[in-house]
Amino acid sequence: MDLPVMPPVKPMLAKSVKNIPPGMQYEAKWDGFRAIVHRDGDEVVIGSRTGKPLTRYFPELAAELAASLPERCVVDGEIVIVHEGRLDFDRLTERIHPADSRVRMLAEQTPASFVAFDLLALGDRALLDTPLTERRELLTEAMRGARPPVHLAPATTDQEVARTWFRQYEGAGLDGVVAKPLTLPYRPDARLMYKIKHERTADVVVAGYRFHKSGPVVGSLLLGLYDDSGVLQHIGVCAAFSMKRRAELVGELEPLRPESAADHPWAAWADESAHETSRLPGAVSRWTGKKDLSWVALRPERVVEVAYDHMEGTRFRHTAQFRRWRPDRDPADCTYAQLEEPVSYDLSQVLSDPGH
């Protein structure tokens, strides 16, 4: 491979803001695996956000990218899996598996797609110093021959259209809007773009905590909601505490530690088969292949209000943010019924919209 921008390359990043800023290029915020694709003839390398190769996990994409992208190019985009008209992050994470046979089986059962939204190099020309508007024009032209499952991400410079996308696209599994300054060069690993994500609040049960990586202080609270059958399901974690507060929480939560964890709603977490029917903490990580043992059980008697962006099935897609304790709430009332459901929106409509 001999390209003007060689792998590995870390992608340019975005920082969170509350409102959609004016005078920029706007795109949907895709919920998948960020990927930098290098193509030089028949050779295709798919790099992850950290620069590590992803090619072996998505064998079906290599041939499709070679068929749809220019002969020599470097493209920034997102790998996604579409299921029943919306993005499915859980099926995407299943691909990170050490067994090649399983990866290839899943590639046939749930093939991935690639959504391109930036161009870092074309032919012998590096585009890192080229303004965004010109890179977008070159990308649009370069992608004219693309065919599914390779797509050009819709983009617009109309702020009102971006606001419409922010409202509608969540129903297809997307989690917000990205705003990019029109003259922005491409700067790997720099947070020079802006992301606007949905935020909602929910009252949830605290049923445990994990220690912080720095020592015996609280790293994150383990959160739960009761399902229709009255079972407390693990839905994620909340964090964002100062180090002083992390230390204080250990003492505050100590009275909630049970003498025995046998009666805890998540007591079966160590049984691998239990994870197939319930949402429990300590599941095997698809990235490391190891079980996280470092969590402390608490009696599910305290309620906390957290902010979250969106759900992935029955859990928070990302880490929730602590807002306040809710001593006025009964843990038994913390159910899935309180969660707002976005209006359904077919992902095919997103991918067929070129923008403005």
Image: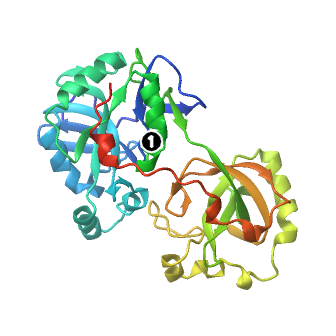
Percent x, y of residue 124: 18, 22
Residue 129 lies in quadrant: top left
> Seen from this angle, which residue lies furthest front?
343
Q: Secondary structure at mark 1?
A: helix
Circle 1 packing at 10 Å, graded few (<14), some (14-19), many (20+), is some
Left or right position of 81 against 267: left
Left or right position of 268 against 76: right
**In percent of the image, x 53 and y 81: which residue is there?**
274
Judge whether 99 appears above or below 23 on screen. Answer: below
**In percent of the image, x 72 and y 85: which residue is there?**
262
The quadrant in which the C terminus is found is top left
**In percent of the image, x 25 and y 61: which residue is there?**
107
Q: Is residue 28 visible?
A: yes
Residue 252 lies in quadrant: bottom right
Q: Badge 1 is on which residue?
A: 168
Percent x, y of residue 235: 60, 63
Tally the marks.
1
Q: Is residue 173 visible?
A: no
Percent x, y of residue 74: 26, 32
Percent x, y of residue 21: 53, 22
Judge whether 14 appears above or below 30 on screen. Answer: above
Judge whether 257 appears above or below 312 on screen. Answer: below
Left or right position of 186 against 22: left
What colour-coding does the image apply? rainbow
The quadrant in which the N terminus is found is top left
- The amino acid on which the numbered mark 1 sits, given as a three-letter code, is Gln
